[in-house]
Structure formats: C-alpha cells, structure tokens
Image (cartoon, rainbow, N blue to C red):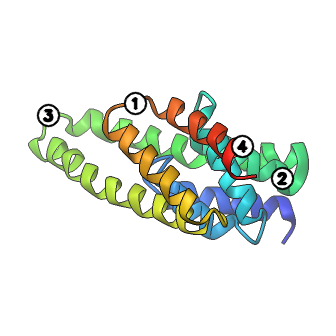
Amino acid sequence: MSLFLQLFWVFVKVNLLSTSGPASVGLLYQEAVGRFVSDAQFVQAVGFSSVLPGSDALQLAMYIGYAAGGIVGGLVALAGSILPPTVIMMGVVFLLQRVRREAWVSSFVEGLAPAISVVILFSAWKIFERGGETGWLGWVFGALSLTAMIFKAPARVVVIVAGVAGILFLR
C-alpha cells in the first residue's frame, strides 16, 4: 500500500473511531508513532497544535502527513481528516432535523461528556508518560500546568509558558 493511501486510511479511521479532536490524540498516537513519526515528533506536534489557533486534529493531521510525505502527504492526511466528520455531520444534521424534539436526544448528548473527559485524560497520561526523559522536572511542569488549568489559566498560555520553561530548564 502506498504511503499516501496509508496516510489517508489512518486519518479516515481515526476520525471515524473518535468523538472529538482532543479525544483522537490517543488513537492517533497508536496509529502514527513508529509508522509516520517518532515519539518526539508526535509530542512536538501536539504541543504546536495546542498553541496555534484552529483545530488541533487538523493541525496534527497536516503535521504528521507533512512529516511522512511532504506537502502532498499533508494534504492527503488533511483530506482523510475532513472527509469522515463532514459526511457524518451531514447525516446527523439530517437525522436531528427529524428527531430534534425527542427527550432522549438531550440525554444522549449529556451522557457523552463524562466519557469524552475520561478519554482525554487517558490520552494525556499516555503522552505525558512517553513524552521524553524529563525526569522529576517533567512531573513538576505537569503539576504546575495542571494547577494553572484548575485555576482557569488559558490553555494556550499554559502551553507557551511550559514550552519556554522547557527551553530554559531542560537543555
């Protein structure tokens, strides 16, 4: 199977099997690391996509696609990322127009929130666990970042400050 077809299939699969951009990070990690990018490249891509404006999932797709196959690889990965949600959303919108007044629809949506939160937490743990050899200082950065997030610091500011601290302290 050609590289571009593999890239397209991986991103179609990830976007079909995950429920949101951040939740797809764990699945994308399993599919892309060692195949298209290294651990370090993946962690770097997640960091960049968190800081830059726009969709994290699409930025990850373009980064991984570009790393694996240049500009064409980035475009193929982007197409694989955009296609499933577009088709699914068109179907869901059509369906929801038919059943929007039913009580079970809002209950279903409310039930998704805790499940998605656990998936994101698990993905973050996997990335942090394999993110590099930062030792105890990495755990300190993680704890400080978590504390900042608990006190409602903007996520982009936390990521930028952690990156600058990494430059200064993890040489």
Residue under pointer 1? 153
Residue under pointer 4? 167
Residue under pointer 3? 101
Mark positioned earlier in the residue sequence (1 or 4): 1
Could you tell me how far apart the alpha carbons at marks 2 and 4 are, in whole angstroms? 23 Å
**Pointer 2 and pointer 3: residues touching (CB < 8 Å)?**
no
Q: Is residue 67 above or below residue 127?
A: above
- Find residue 36 and report its image quarter: bottom right
Which amino acid, by three-letter code, is at mark 2? Answer: Ala
Give percent across and percent down for residue 101. 14, 34
Which amino acid, by three-letter code, is at mark 4? Answer: Ile
Q: Residue at x 54, y 64 (%)?
A: 136
> Badge 4: few (under 14), some or many (20 or more) residues near its Cα, within 10 Å?
few
Q: Secondary structure at mark 4?
A: helix
Could you tell me how far apart the alpha carbons at marks 4 and 3 are, in whole angstroms? 53 Å
Could you tell me how far apart the alpha carbons at marks 2 and 1 are, in whole angstroms? 32 Å
Q: Secondary structure at mark 3?
A: loop
> Badge 2: few (under 14), some or many (20 or more) residues near its Cα, within 10 Å?
some
Mark positioned earlier in the residue sequence (2 or 1): 2
Mark positioned earlier in the residue sequence (2 or 3): 2
Single out the mark in the foreground, 2 or 3. Answer: 2
Single out the mark in the foreground, 2 or 4. Answer: 4
Single out the mark in the foreground, 1 or 3. Answer: 1
Give percent across and percent down for residue 53. 60, 27
Single out the mark in the foreground, 1 or 4. Answer: 4
Mark positioned earlier in the residue sequence (2 or 4): 2
Q: Residue at x 78, y 48 (%)?
A: 76
